[in-house]
Image (spheres, rainbow, N blue to C red):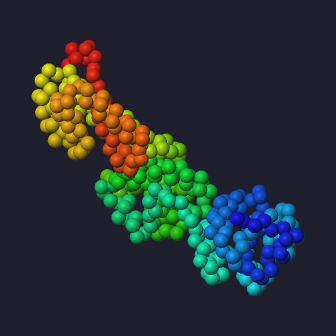
Amino acid sequence: NVIDLTDANFDEYVNGEKSVFVEFFAPWCGHCKALAPEYEIVADAFAKTDNVVIAKVDCTVEKDTGSRFGVTGYPTLKFFKKGKTDPEDYNGGRTADDIVNHINKESGSRALIKKAPTTVLQLDSSNFDKIALDENKDVLVEFYAPWCGHCKKLTPVYEEVGRTFKTDKNCVVAKVDADSEKELGGRFGISGFPTIKFFPKTNKEGEAYSGGRSEADFVSFLNEKCGLSRVVGGGLAETAGRVESLDALAAKFVAAEDKAAVMEETVKACEAMEDKQAAYYHKFMKKIIEKGDGYVETETSRLSKMLETGPLADDKRDHFIIRRNILSSFVVITEETKEEL
């Protein structure tokens, strides 16, 4: 939606009939490359606005036009207001929001940027302390600047990390626009972008994150710090919900003659744990006593079918995976293992 202007067609578009915002650029310019995705967002925002045109001029090719408007550096941004052919220099911010707001103000239009839904929590001075400093939450925070190229490169990766942990209410993936929230940036010593800090439940001063920046790196880090078992792309690992000591009791239960006694032992062990999912161990024991050993296979098949056919809400899917994982600890064991028990 960005119009390419040339020496030949420039006056055809910039003739006073509409407001025209123009970027004068050079293809080799690093700052121009950084601006390009934001500029596309601006153009998309005004795509259906009749009285505004978003355009660009490649000054390495259209040299007469660049010279005509005194362009000596890149990118140079100029706004040609409706009714005029003489431009006003634009020296404001270079995020899509900044440029769109300026054009709306000068042209009287009401364009809006269509923002993709996000699972990364946006923090600012109004909610940072409430979220990041909550002692019940582990919070990973990216301090970024909208114009930062490295931040833009990290965005899709960080978004996937947010999506992976979106159902874990106490393991939060968040970000702060430290270019706008300068007080927050200064408070935590942010001097470069992106800077990533982890605010665990036990240390609300914040800890520098110095690990890798792939989705797998972030997921591994948060799993370790938050005590979770997420897999890259979302979902849960086969270990999610499993407790080693209760797995041992499940094996003992399968091999035992007096299953009721093992179930009572398991009930007491679960009562001493804070993990609510642990109760499934003794609940499954009760079902096996009532319905026989075939219950494990039947219930596992039922859960697997629901997980495969869906659709399921994310929290419901997690719940079913955990139940299936715990059931797997009751798979019939070998005679050799029975003898050991």
The quarter of the displayed image where residue 27 is located: bottom right
The quarter of the displayed image where residue 325 is located: top left
- Name the foreground residue: 92 vs 267: 267
**Which residue is depicted at the point 50% across and 59% down?**
117
Answer with left or right where residue 223 lies relative to residue 254. Answer: right
The quarter of the displayed image where residue 93 is located: bottom right
**Residue 150 placed where, x, y %?**
60, 54
Answer with left or right where residue 79 lies relative to residue 303. Answer: right
**Residue 157 placed where, x, y %?**
53, 49
**Which residue is depicted at the point 20% across and 21% down?**
255
Visible in this render: residue 312? yes
Answer with left or right where residue 163 lies relative to residue 289. Answer: right
**Which residue is depicted at the point 51% across and 64% down?**
177
- Where is the N terminus found, in terms of image quarters? bottom right
**Which residue is depicted at the point 87% across and 69% down?**
7
- Where is the C terminus found, in terms of image quarters? top left
